Image: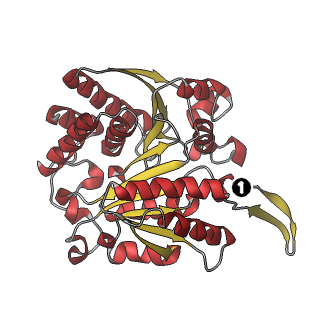
Amino acid sequence: MEFNIALLRGDGIGPEIVDGAAAVLEKIGEKFGHRFNFTPYLIGGCAIDETGEPLPKETVEGCLASDSVLLGAVGGPKWDGLPGEKRPEKALLGIRSALGLFTNLRPASLYPALRAASPLKDEIVGKGFDIMIVRELTGGIYFGDRGFRQGKYGEEAFDTEAYSFTEIERIGRVAFETAMKRSKRLCSVDKANVLETSRLWRRIMHELSEEYPEVEYRDMFVDNAAMQLVRDPSQFDVIVTSNMFGDILSDEASQITGSIGMLASASLGAGTRGMYEPIHGSAPDIAGQNKANPTATILSAAMMLRYSFGLTEEAGAVEAAVNKVLDAGFRTADLLCAGEGDPLSCTEMTTKIIEAI
């Protein structure tokens, strides 16, 4: 089989980790008889430097013409002084919208080999956890009206959150279907005691729950969910929530796994094309030093194999290779605990995973 993949390397450590993931995909192609064609496009700060825009038209067109998209990271202090509409991060919202990617899947599980790296007490993480956060991706406050105006105390800034029935219903259905494929447990996170959007969110989720009687469903306020994630993460299986709440909670979930460098994500729409990326940022402080952990991007590529290409066995081979390398004690700098030896470089970690496939 042959697949066309758009590579959005982006900024900071983006080029290093995307190239590592592409190398792993090439190994999968070699082993299983597939061909992956990679085409690079500009996005973020590097696109601003080259074209003056964070998301060039050519990039959008290239991604739309591809079978799927692999993204590194965007942004950095070099572009912090730009106005909001011109910042690198604006490209992320733009490409998600252009590709119609309204669902973000963010798994967070504890690898047994990394148990000691979790900041939580051993009696908490000892039970293990395997969470899938289903985040709405193209609505809410990140896409609402915004600006500056004169208010009661002078100049003020505003950002508006709005959600339609359709936006909530479609992400809710994805979450229930995801729960049906796992342990049939779903927690919907909102702030319905304060926000009107959350009240609509909760009403629609309750209506959907009647269509999925096999799913054990519950509601939880976002502040309580943040607390429960560190008190007992094993209580969760699938979590569904809004764009901003999902952004925050998924980063919290990543940290309790031991390192944000291990967490992958998939952004999906109505079709099979998706955008896959690690949930960490561009890490400009270590960019170009070959220190970055490529594992989250490699695991994102595994999600691409599974969700966009239907290559379940191939995805499993990548995930098993990551487990094997971790079990053997190999670590990048972000995963090292005291006394565990010297860290591997980005390219060395990639090579170990390729050798384990």
SS class, disc 1: loop
Coloring basis for residues = secondary structure
Q: How many marks?
A: 1
Q: Position of residue 7 (x, y in %)?
A: 46, 29
Q: Where is residue 189 in the image (x, y as percent from the top left)?
A: 50, 69
Q: Is residue 259 visible?
A: no
Dividing the picture into quarters, in which one does residue 97 lie? top right
Which residue is rendered at x = 56% and y = 51% of the image?
A: 137
Q: In this view, does 350 lie to the left or right of 37?
A: left
Q: Nearer the viewer, residue 314 or 354?
A: 314
Q: Which residue lies furthest to the left in this view?
A: 328
Q: Where is residue 252 in the image (x, y as percent from the top left)?
A: 42, 64
Q: Is residue 168 left or right of residue 84?
A: left
Q: Is residue 313 visible?
A: yes
Classify the position of the N terminus by image quarter: top left
- Residue that carries the numbered disc 1 in the rendered image: 144
Q: Which of 32 and 18 is in front in this view?
A: 32
Q: Where is residue 108 in the image (x, y as percent from the top left)?
A: 34, 58
Which residue is rendered at x = 60% and y = 75% of the image?
A: 192
Classify the position of the C terminus by image quarter: top left
Q: Is residue 228 left or right of residue 203?
A: left
Dividing the picture into quarters, in which one does residue 53 lie? top right
174, above or below 99, in the image: below
Which residue is rendered at x = 31% and y = 39% of the image?
A: 302
**Badge 1 amino acid:** Gly
Q: Residues within 10 Å of mark 1 (few under 14, many from 20)?
A: some
